[in-house]
Amino acid sequence: MVYQFVTTDKELAHMCLELEPCDIIGVDLEADSMHCFSEKICLIQIAGLNRAWLVDPFLVSDFSPFSRILENPGIIKVFHGSDFDVRSLDRELSVEIENLFDTEIACRFLNIQERGLGALLKSFFNIDVDKKYQKVDWSKRPLKDDMIAYSVGDVATLVQLHDLLKDRLEKMGRLAWAQEEFDLQARVKYESNHSRPLFKRFKGAGKLDNRSLAVLEHLLAVRLALAEKKDLPPFKIMSNQSIMAMVQHRPTSIDTVLKRQVLSPKQAGMYGQLCVEAIETALALPHRELPSYPKIRMPRKTPQILNRIDELKKMRETASRTLAMEPGFLINNNTIAAVATANPLTLDALGQIPGMRRWQVEALGDQILDTLSRTH
């Protein structure tokens, strides 16, 4: 595909003039979240039917014309696995995307198991994609020729992929179902990974006691400060496994750190003392100052509600096979619990339950109500 680099505000404005008459475009982003502390968009790829543009966000300052393209409901914007892209565009452009089509979400409604873009390009177009480019540092300049070729290839087939998937969705009567999910996906917002308390985003923190949470929070604060200073993502300072090992063993000397092998010798030499001091500080906190994990008050699950949950899960397994959709996507456990608790008697009442989609009511509503009627 013919492509053009966009490196000035004038070039971006001209690109957007060319995009305005389009009915559909493909959009993709490359970022540096694997390499830098504060992740940022490093390249924006846009493709029409016969042409692509590579926008360098380090050189363009006025993105308002592109924001208007993204907000234009008359243009379909095709993404693949758009969650990261939507959040990144919200963070940097404060833009809400109108008329989004996500090829990965579309695949879920079509029971396509291998949903990575590389797998789809291989399956539909017999194109092989080297996955190594997903981990390269896109913030470095100049971009190498092979990176440019990858970035163009990544976006070049999105419109064609959209056409194929949309056709299948229409034939199965599921295009409106998928569109509801696309619209919800387009409204997600960026949330910082560095907001306090840090342990809220740490897997397994909810099972820790208050003292362990204090140790965890102090260690995470050390890692965050080091990551920011070195301009690296936190996982490149210390892994979550190392952090949790220190929470569990609470080493209070470098020797113990090395003996427990909670850090590598190199890490122990660089960060060990800071970690030990953080642990000691947390262990010395008075009880009244210890953090607690925020608990969501859930309605008490009576035996009757638990029985409804079990029966709804059985119904889901049967429906999953009939509809050829993954059970957890068809309706997740949280929504099943909410339905079992609310015990709706009508489809309208079912549709009012938080988290329940219109397409789920259409696909499963009668089966859900029938299941509930047999578990009173």
Image (cartoon, rainbow, N blue to C red):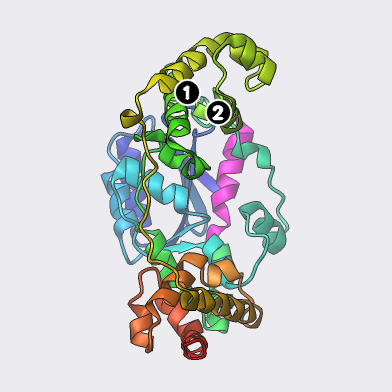
Residue 224 picture location, percent across and down: 43, 25
Residue matched to label 1: 223
User: Which is the main secondary structure of the residues drawn in magenta?
Assistant: helix
Residue 58 picture location, percent across and down: 39, 30
Label 2, secondary structure: give it: helix
Q: Is residue 303 above or below residue 29?
A: below
Amino acid type, label 2:
Ile
Front residue of 146 and 15: 146
| Range drawn in magenta | 144-159
Residue matched to label 2: 243
Residue 147 picture location, percent across and down: 60, 35
Residue 149 is covered by the magenta coloring: yes
Front residue of 339 and 143: 339
Q: Residues within 10 Å of mark 1 (few under 14, many from 20)?
A: many
Q: Is residue 123 above or below residue 373?
A: above
Residues marked 2 and 1 touching at CB (< 8 Å): yes
> Which one is in front in this view, the residue at disc 2 or the one at disc 1?
2
Amino acid type, label 1:
Arg
Q: Residues within 10 Å of mark 2 (few under 14, many from 20)?
A: many
Q: Residue at x 49, y 39 (%)?
A: 208
Label 1, secondary structure: give it: helix
CA gap, disc 2 and disc 1: 9 Å
Left or right: where does residue 125 sit relative to residue 198?
right
**Quarter of the view holding residue 6:** top left
Residue 243 is covered by the magenta coloring: no
Residue 64 picture location, percent across and down: 26, 45
Quick check: can you spot residue 35? Answer: no
